[in-house]
Image: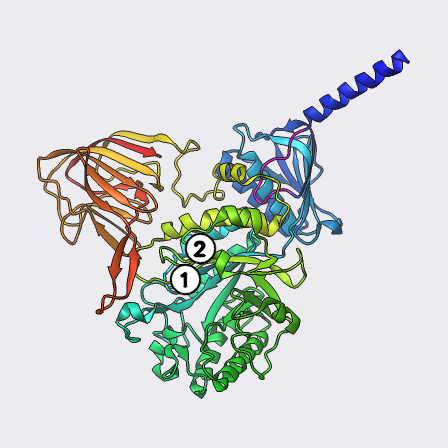
Amino acid sequence: MKSIKSLLFVLCIVNALAVFAENVKPFVIPELKEWRGKEGYFSVDASTRVVCNHKNKQLVDVAEQFAEDYYTMFGVKLQVVDGRAGNGDIVFELSKNNKLGKEGYSIDINKKVVVSAPEVVGTFWATRTLLQISEQTDDRTLPNGLIKDFPDYEIRGFMMDCGRKFIPMSYLRDFMKIMSYYKMNTFQIHLNDNGFKQFFNQDWDKTYAAFRLECDTYPGLTARDGYYTKKEFGEFQDEASSYFVEIIPEIDAPAHTLAFSHYKPEIGSKEYGMDHLDLFNPETYKFMDGLFKEYLEGDKPVFRGPKVHIGTDEYSNKDKKVVEKFREFTDRYIKYVESFGKQACVWGALTHAKGETPVKSENVIMSAWYNGYAEPKEMVKQGYKLISIPDGFLYIVPAAGYYYDYLNTKSLYESWTPAHVGKEVFEEKDPAILGGMYAVWNDHVGNGISVKDIHHRSYPALQTLSAKMWTGKNVSVPYKEFETKRNALSEAPGVNQLGRIGKETKGVVFQADEIKPGMVLPHEEVGYGYSVEFDIEGSEEEMGTELFRSSSAVLYLSDPIDGMMSFARDGYRNSFGFKLYPGEKAHICIEGDNKSTVLKVNGKTVKTLDVQKRYFSNDGKAKLNYTSTLVFPLKKAGQFKSKITNLKVTQK
């Protein structure tokens, strides 16, 4: 009896030690669905090979992208080979495990790493997991264990309003890569829109409007202050496809169409406003047919992907006649897009525009944004599949004072899933809910908001919503822990839109004894929460003399307008109203965050550029919040005559 008790005691100890030795689930965004920890770790070094079947080109492309990203992030070159894998290798293979679904994957980490998935997309998502785990340790080791991972929702997306503010293609490409790094797979590009008339003296002719695509059918329609060529927009979609992100282009009509009526005034509505198309004018339909056709026709159309968004929201429902005409317009362009082999997407508006005219619902995707415009359960009953994008939860309108400036990520993380469409709550993974999106709307034209400001708002929302669109309600990491750990992850391989310098985000991150004219520095920029200090001995400078430049901003020592210290980015100039005299010596400190930019000279604040109310109408009623932020440019010094010494860059 004593022997049996002793044996049981030993077994309990052994089991306890075994459990203790099992690796805990690694932190990944989105959170891994299943993890079974083992003992030990897998190490990657220069001898590690990436092995896959070279007969499958897509699988080879995934393996090569992984190797390229691994080198970008960690400086280690991994050879991609065909053949039999051995210990120390990373293997990519396709399997027939249908339980994982289309995008699911498994990773078995032991003496070798075996990535297995039913489809190639799953192997790609597995590479994002491996990279995220690797970047959280100094030696890039992977904990031994078995991962099984798959999404709750098919569509996990984001919409960017490029109509009211031009968003450079370089940024769209970076953000697409960030989305991919966090397994977000749908990027909607809102290509046309307009500002609000009250900010332009109630004059439609002067109200800002833009259409962002090169257009041959209607020369002169394309915005002059920023647009995408058809070639680059096509290439962008092709590149996104290689990252398993689908681009959904959106031409929004028949409201939000001031750019079209600026070009062709006779198709604008005199009754409902020139930002509405005249739905009773046959010329309207000729125009819209020609516009869509340019981007949809041919063997390799400009709109590459399977889906096209046709807008159809926020039109007047003043009388029954216009409601029926709106429904007719919606049905017509659903079918018109489908005639080119595309699936049509629409904004939800058919509760607002309730009527008798039938609107096609079969195989049509509806963005459910406001339940007063489209009651979700009624839309499902009518046959629509929904993307959950409720405005009260998921709309960012930078610095506007309504909707969200920054999303409430804590509330979203703890309470929201795509099953929550406003106040309407569906069952989790209801087949009528394809997934979710969030959006940035650049409503207030001319408010000083930069692309960097937009990114500062959209990136933490992306990380949070990635977790909820993939993992649903079953996240297990507490929000406080999630918030701390998410900040330690990269935006994506080779992407640093936040301007973070180094892994340590606090303290002095760069110093230089002297900055000479034309000098190239090792960092592009430093992001919000910084101070940049230097000593200067002034000389007579020509107007337009730059101090520092990056790809997104310029800091002037003597700007081209008034010769003062100032900065420019995104077409906005912000002056500090300070000029150094020739021969004068001073210690300069510039501090910046997501609200303000401050100039200090010899320890005293000279100018604080923060959020200001600006009036944009003669009656003084239309006012908006103007933002004067700066992600500080560091890449290249200008051709100045002054002497710059003791540069110190601090991240706060």
Q: Secondary structure at mark 1?
A: loop
Q: Is residue 178 visible?
A: no
Q: Residues within 10 Å of mark 2 (few under 14, many from 20)?
A: some
Q: Which of label 2 and label 1 is nearer to you?
A: 1
Task: Look at label 2 and name its amino acid.
Answer: Leu
For the record, the magenta segment spans 23-32
Farthest right residue? 1
Q: Residue at x 54, y 27 (%)?
A: 139
Farthest front residue? 423
Question: In terms of depth relative to the viewer, which is nearer, 634 or 193?
Answer: 193
> Which label was assigned to residue 172?
2
Task: Look at label 1 and name its amino acid.
Answer: Cys
Q: Is residue 526 above or below residue 363?
A: above
Horizontal side, residue 1 vs residue 34: left or right: right
Q: What is the x, y in percent for residue 132? A: 55, 39
Residue identifier under label 1: 162
Q: Residue at x 55, y 47 (%)?
A: 413
Q: What is the x, y in percent for residue 334? A: 56, 75
> In which quadrant of the rendered view does residue 161 lie?
bottom left
